[in-house]
Amino acid sequence: MIPFPRTDLAVEAQTRAPSVNGVRTEERTEGGFRVSTVTILNSMASKELCKPIGNYHTITLDPVLRREEAAFSAASELISKVLQSLCQIPADASALVIGLGNRAITPDAIGPRAMESVLATRHLHSQFPGSFPELRPVCSIAAGVLGDTGIESASIVKALVRDLQPDLVIVVDALACAESERLCRTIQLTDTGITPGSGVGNDREALSEQSLGVPVLAVGVPTVMDFPGAESGLFVTPRNIDSVVSDFSKLIGYAINLALHPTLSVSDFDLLLS
């Protein structure tokens, strides 16, 4: 018997167990993008789906991959809107954005690459008090991986949270999926945090509100797919993974910017990040 392939996507886990009580689902189209929402309401449903209680939104980004006109801006705005819906962010709240993953391995580079497009502003508030009222204090870091740093990502993030005391943490990471139609075509956003490496069977310590003491939003793109029918431990990724990682990393960075600095626009960030 071939086991179910593992997945980080709640929408796929729910599809496997559609009759589980305590799960609410919704499908809609917004701004030309398909949005699937799964809400896990209780501990029984959480156990059945192997996902924490909370909200999961999966957005299909085909117009971006087709490079349709204005698709990047529309997707950035939609993702930022969903992020804002997951957590009420006061105007003066500070944020810490974390990119997880290995920059040297392309399917795992979404997190570090996304940090290149996140606007860091915390230092501006300390150096030029009152000069940038439209920018909230934001800092970002690519946390690296255990094999390179000798430090668990969770230990780095906990130390940063203790020192910086942000009001919100946003974590970006690569995910694994079970269905080829979602591979490198979707993005999942959730208010449950993340367990790095869980999709590929290399679970590390979870980054969540319970472990960090502040709300944690997680953003992820499935860049690999479990392939249990071949041999143990085999994962596949598409041949255009380089362009997908490049496009989606920038998209995530801009969407986070829009969510944290809602008075600015995509064109503003083009200028500020150039």
Image (spheres, rainbow, N blue to C red):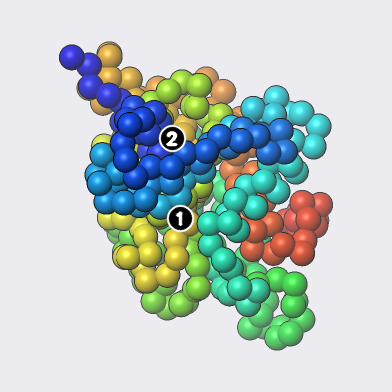
Give the side of residue 53 with respect to residue 131, left or right.
left
Question: What x and y, as percent, mark residue 128?
Answer: 72, 83
Q: Is residue 183 above or below residue 128?
A: above
Q: Residue at x 61, y 73 (%)?
A: 90
Give the crowd class for mark 1: few <14, some 14-19, many >=20 residues within 10 Å. Answer: many
Q: Is residue 70 left or right of residue 51?
A: right
Q: Helix or strand or loop: what does disc 2 sit on?
A: helix
**Relative to 150, is 202 above or below?**
above
State the image quarter where residue 268 is shown.
Answer: bottom right
Residue 149 visible in this rendered orientation of the protein: no
Q: In which quarter of the image is the N terminus?
A: top left
Between the C-alphas of marks 2 and 1, the distance is 15 Å
Give the side of residue 244 with respect to residue 74, left or right: left
Amino acid under disc 2: Val
Position of residue 129 measured from the top left corner of the image (x, y, whole percent): 70, 86
Residue at the (70%, 48%) spot, across then down? 77
In the rendered image, residue 185, in percent from the top left (x then y), is placed at 56, 29
Residue bearing the label numbered 2: 11
- Residue 160 drawn at (x, y percent): 42, 71
- The residue under the point 64% across, 58% down is 259
Circle number at residue 191:
1
Q: Nearer the viewer, residue 197 or 63?
A: 63
Residue furthest to the left in view is 1
Dot 1 amino acid type = Asp
In primary-sequence order, the first of circles 2 and 1 is 2
Give me the residue at 50% from left, 73% from top.
Answer: 167
Q: In this view, does 180 lie above or below 77?
A: above
- Where residue 4 is drawn, which disc sits there? none
Foreground: 126 or 19? 19
The number of callouts visible is 2
> Are the residues tagged 2 and 1 within 8 Å (C-beta)?
no
Question: Does the rendering let one see residue 205?
Answer: yes
